[in-house]
Every structure is written in C-alpha cells, then in structure tokens.
Amino acid sequence: MQIDTFLTIGKSHKVCEDYILSGTDPMPYIILADGCSSSKGTDMGARLLCYLAQQYIRFRSTKYFEPDHKEMGMWIIHNAELVAKQLGLPNHSLDSTLIIAYKNYGINNIRVHFYGDGCLIYFGKKQTLFGQIEYTKNAPYYLSYYIDPERDQLFHDMKQDKIVKTLITGQSLIGTTEIFAYDSPSVYNYILNDEFNGLLIASDGMTSFIADREGLVDPSLYINEFHEFKTTKGEFLKRRVNKLLKNLAKEEIYNADDLSVGAFLLEE
C-alpha cells in the first residue's frame, strides 16, 4: 500500500487554509482539513483538527479499528477547543471540514469519514468513481458547531440538506444525486483490489477549477488525470498533480480554492 499527499493554495487566496498529513503507524492513514475562508484563524484550526485526528488514530486504534463516527468527531473537536483556548484562538477558528481515511488492519479496505464537504476518486483501469459531498447553501456542517449551541441552532434554522453526487466514468458516463439530512454521518468503505486499485480523498478545491474566459470547469473533464500515474514510486501523487496543474495553467485554468489531495494506491 502506497500513500502520498499534495497541497497547494488557491488562486483567489492569500493564506492556505487547507492542511493535510499522513502516516503509516499504526496503519496507513491520511487526514485533511479545509478551513472556512470567512472565519479568522482557520489555517491554524485546520492544522489542529488534523493533528488531533492523528492522535485519536494513534491512541485509540485496535486490531479491528472501526470507531464510532460521532464519538470520534466529538473527541477531536473538544480537544481542539482546549488547545485553541490555550493558543488564544476563538472557537470559530475551528470552522473547518475534516476528512479522515485509514486502512483497516489485515485487509485492503479504506474507511473514510467526512465531517463537512469534500471529494473522493475511487479508480481502476476501466472505471473511475468520482464522489462529492456538498450542502444546498454552500455552508458545510462543521464539527465546531457542536461546541457552540447558538451557532448550531442558527445552522439548523437554515434548513440545509447534504447532497452526495456520484459520477462514474468509463465506457459510459453515469451520474446520481442523493439528498440527506445535514447532520447525517458520512462514512464509506472502499476495497482496493485488481479492479479498483486506488483511492484519492480531496478538499472541495478539486471542483474549484476556473477557466478565465468560461467560468467553472466541469470536473468530468479532468478528474481522471488526477490518477494517471506514470510511476508509483516515491512522491507519485505530487508529481502527477503538479504536472496536471501545469497543463491546466497552459489553458488558463486554475484552482480558485485551496486544494489538498491524499492517495492510497495498491501496487500491482
């Protein structure tokens, strides 16, 4: 199992509010966070959430690690609140989406937890599945609302839904859309095998590519290029995405939002 990560700032940003980290102890894992641009200090908040999620994995892992989605989120946000206070940061600095992905012990199963919005690509030689989680009013449900009852109620009063979009590319193009309650858990399992040998998780910066003259670019035009690896040694994801961004820049296409991507790859 190979893992690698990539991070870059968005063209419309002055500070990168995404963060991503990875490791292999006690199992391969990738964690990323996407701080809210309209809240101050979320570049720090995103880092805090990532490192506390890493601590949860390190200290709570067992032989069959399948943590309760809400319990894990609550542990992370309450501990992040304590650290933020010690640093003099307000609670809204923790306004950030969080994605946690890890390989289960003994099997090639990748389990992914979404807290807020984000993207993933599950791919093989013949097909690619692109998944995206977003919200009807473009305001994700952050873990930080759990520690602020007033803001939690205000979010509830917005009457938003969570939207899960799936696009499958291959011999044909198939798209589906499902609607869920905004606070419903988003936990997914993906098996890596001969048919589907890789999984990418990403912030919503993956869908923020803009052509200067034409506006937002349809993700179906470029998502497959994120995993067209020429080699899979070393920093295979960094090489691939850097090359992709250079090619898109030649066509005057850029990611407006910060972009963080993590890859799990089962070598042949």
Image (cartoon, rainbow, N blue to C red):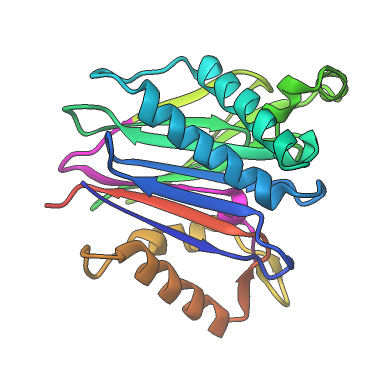
- Whether the magenta-drawn stretch holds residue 192 is answered as yes
Horizontal arrangement in the rendering, residue 8 relative to residue 125 (left or right): right
Q: Where is residue 13 in the image (x, y as percent from the top left)?
A: 73, 65
> Which of the pair 46/124 is nearer the observer?
46
Which residue appears at 21% of the width and 34% of the height? 108
Q: Is residue 250 above or below residue 229?
A: below
Where 61 falls versus 191 (above or below)? above
- Residue visible at 61% across and 18% down? 184
Whether 208 is among the magenta residues is: yes
Which of the 4 image quarters holds residue 130? top left
Identify which residue, 246 or 43, lies in the foreground.
Answer: 43
- Seen at 18% across and 39% down, the residue is 193
Q: Residue at (82%, 49%) from the top-left corner?
A: 38
In the image, the segment drawn in magenta is: 190-209
Q: Which of 235 and 74 is in front in this view?
A: 74
Residue at the extreme front of the image, as rendered? 86
Image spot of residue 138 (x, y percent):
75, 40
> Which residue is at the front of the view, 42 or 233?
42
In the rendered image, the vertical position of residue 215 relative to residue 102, given as above or below:
below
Q: Where is residue 43 in the image (x, y as percent from the top left)?
A: 67, 52
Q: Where does residue 260 sit, x and y in percent of width and height?
A: 52, 55
The reply to whether residue 191 is in sight is: yes
